[in-house]
Amino acid sequence: MTFTKTSQKFGQWADSRANTVFGLGFSSEQQLTKFAEKFQEVKEAARLARDKSQEKTETSSNHSQESGCESPSSTQASSVNGTDDEKASHVGPADTHLKSENDKLKIALTQSAANVKKWEVELQTLRESNARLTAALQESAASVEQWKRQFSLCREENDRLRNKIDELEEQCSEINREKERNTQLKQRIEELESEVREKETELNDLRKQSEIIPQLMSECEYVSEKLEAAERDNQNLEGKVRSLKTDIEESKYRQRHLKVELKSFLEVLDAKIDGLHDFRRGLSKLGADS
């Protein structure tokens, strides 16, 4: 399996046995890089373990083949060099041990052959999975390119829609301003209509008053006559007021003269009272001396 970075924050790998492609998203590109490095370390460790197991298997198979080849030669040498009596004497525990060793080697060869077939099947499976993974990676790369193109188209469409939204918002603001102007105009119209109704009411009142103008004129003439009589009375009253003012001035003069005389009298009275106080103090002193 091979981990591939498809973007700055996303990576994927394919499992050929399960025929599945896995993907992971990361919050940052640093975390994605760390995961890719750790993925590669685990992959290398698995490869090294697999290589070591293969070397051990090949070594065991080589040893089994060598022992299998040596046992027939030894038996052939014993059959050539020895007589029938020697053969009969040599047939015993050693031969039985060799047969058992030979059987074990045959079993080991059979197992190694089965393992080789199994490894060939696994190798073929790995090749197929690698091919599928390569195809999947190519498809993913193509899909990434397609996604990039779609993303650029979407971005262009988004920019166009944003411009359109800005235009619509500007139009909406213009419509709102027009609505505000219309509202203000409606309010002004309502105010003017109310003023017109008030003027009409005043006009009706003036018309009603114009009907009573002749009566008001007659009343005005009557009032003007009364005003003339009142003016004459006022002139008479003014003469009386002037005479009263003269009398008041004379009374004020008399009051001032009386105040002066009263002041002088009070001064004389105060002097006499002071003399009486002195006389009283003298009497009191004489009484105290006597």
Image (tube, rainbow, N blue to C red):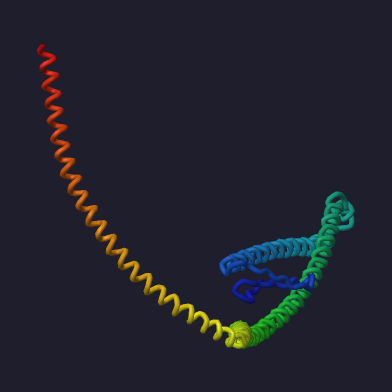
Q: Is residue 54 above or below residue 94?
A: below
Q: Is residue 133 above or below residue 280?
A: below
Residue 167 visible in this rendered orientation of the protein: no
Q: Is residue 62 above or below residue 153?
A: above
Q: Residue at x 13, y 35 (%)?
A: 271
Left or right position of 189 against 282: right
Q: Residue at x 67, y 83 (%)?
A: 147
Q: Give coordinates of residue 198: x percent, y percent.
A: 61, 82
Left or right position of 76 against 49: right
Q: Nearer the viewer, residue 202 or 110?
A: 202
Q: Residue at x 54, y 86 (%)?
A: 217
Q: Quadrant of residue 119?
A: bottom right
Left or right position of 166 against 252: right
Q: How many marks?
A: 0
Residue 29 visible in this rendered orientation of the protein: yes
Q: Quadrant of residue 156?
A: bottom right
Q: Residue at x 75, y 75 (%)?
A: 129
Q: Give coordinates of residue 152: x percent, y percent.
A: 62, 85
Q: Nearer the viewer, residue 14 or 124?
A: 14
Q: Quadrant of residue 204?
A: bottom right
Q: Give coordinates of residue 222: x percent, y percent.
A: 52, 81
Q: Looking at the figure, which quarter contains the N terminus?
A: bottom right
Q: Nearer the viewer, residue 245 or 16?
A: 245
